[in-house]
Each structure stands twice: as C-alpha cells, then as structure tokens.
Amino acid sequence: MDSDKLMRGIIPGIIAGYLFLAFIGASMVPSLDVTMSEGGDMVANVEQGAPMMNNGMLEMVGGMIGADALIGFILHVIISAVIGALYTGLFMQYVDLGSPLYNIAVGGLIYGVIWWILGGLIIMPAIAGGELLQINLNSPSLFGHIMFGHALAFLVALRDRRMTAMDE
C-alpha cells in the first residue's frame, strides 16, 4: 500500500467519525433532567459525574480496553482515522465506479456496511464479550456506519477535487 494514498483518508476519516458520533447521539455532556415543580416552575437537575450516553456506544468502545467513555471517544477517533486511511489506501482501488457521485453513493454505502459488519457485529462484540452477528436492520449503528461511509467518500472526493484544482 502506498503511504500517500493512506494519508489521504486520515482527516476525512476523523471528520466522518465525528459525524457518526453525532448521528448516533453519543455525548460527553452531563445529563440534564428538566421537570416541572408543584408550583409550575421548571427545575433542572444535572447529574454530576455521569456522562450522558443515550446509547452507551462510547462506553462500549472504551470498555473494549477496560477504559471509560472518554478513552472510548479517543479510541473511536483513532479507529476512524485508520478506517479512513484504509478507504483511500485499499478500498478505492477496487471500487471505482467511474464517477465521484457513484463512488460516494454506492462505494460509501458498501464501505459503511462492511465496517458495520466488521466493527459493529464482529470485532466489538468479540472483544466486549457479546454475541457475534446480532443483526438489527433498524439500528442506529447500521445507519451511522452507512452515513460514515457516505461522508468519508464525499470528503475524499471533495479533497481530491480540490487538490486537483490546486495542481492546475
């Protein structure tokens, strides 16, 4: 693999990873519970010390190495960079559909589904001690990985187009 090709995908991978986290609702923000008091006033209760993970994804990622959600976030960023590098260094040479738009739509879909299967259904459960291949076609993880693949393909195409225009 050409290291220049690998490097082209690192930043797009990180950005797509952030979009994935935003899509599935992973947050390090303290939980805020707003209720109405008997007098009709709004009362906000902030749960201190417990980050809100409405789906626990970052805790699961961190838990793979015995760490917390913050380390899970850092690990997810690193994984996103590696997956982005693999997209440009390996995947793109096998899936070139002749048009950047097709590469984004179809190639991004395929790449996202590949990483949903590998990461979400095999690697993560294997490390965390869960059951492998527990397929849920209505899961935020599936749609998040597809969105990741599309965002990654789009960002790489955008970057490549800009770099080509700068060379001219």
Image: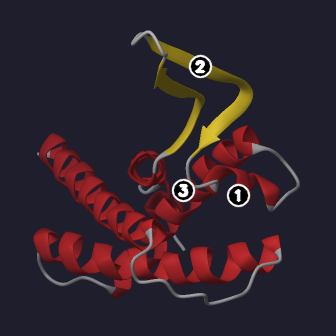
Q: Position of residue 132 (x, y in %)?
A: 69, 88
Q: Which residue is mark 2?
A: 45
Can you say which quadrant of the picture contains the C terminus? top left
Q: How much space separates mark 1 and mark 2, taking CA atoms?
A: 28 Å
Q: Residue at x 17, y 53 (%)?
A: 161
Above or below, comparing residue 71 to residue 12 in the picture? above
Q: How much space separates mark 2 and mark 3, taking CA atoms?
A: 34 Å
Q: Nearer the viewer, mark 2 or mark 3?
A: 2
Q: Answer yes or no: do the residues labelled 1 and 3 have beta carbons within 8 Å? A: no
Mark 2 surroundings within 10 Å by alpha-carbon count, few (fewer than 14), some (14 through 19), many (20 or more): few
Residue type, mark 2 in image: Asn
Residue 80 tag number: 3
Residue type, mark 3 in image: Ser
Residue type, mark 1 in image: Val
Q: Earlier in the sequence, mark 2 or mark 3?
A: 2
Q: How much space separates mark 1 and mark 3, taking CA atoms?
A: 12 Å
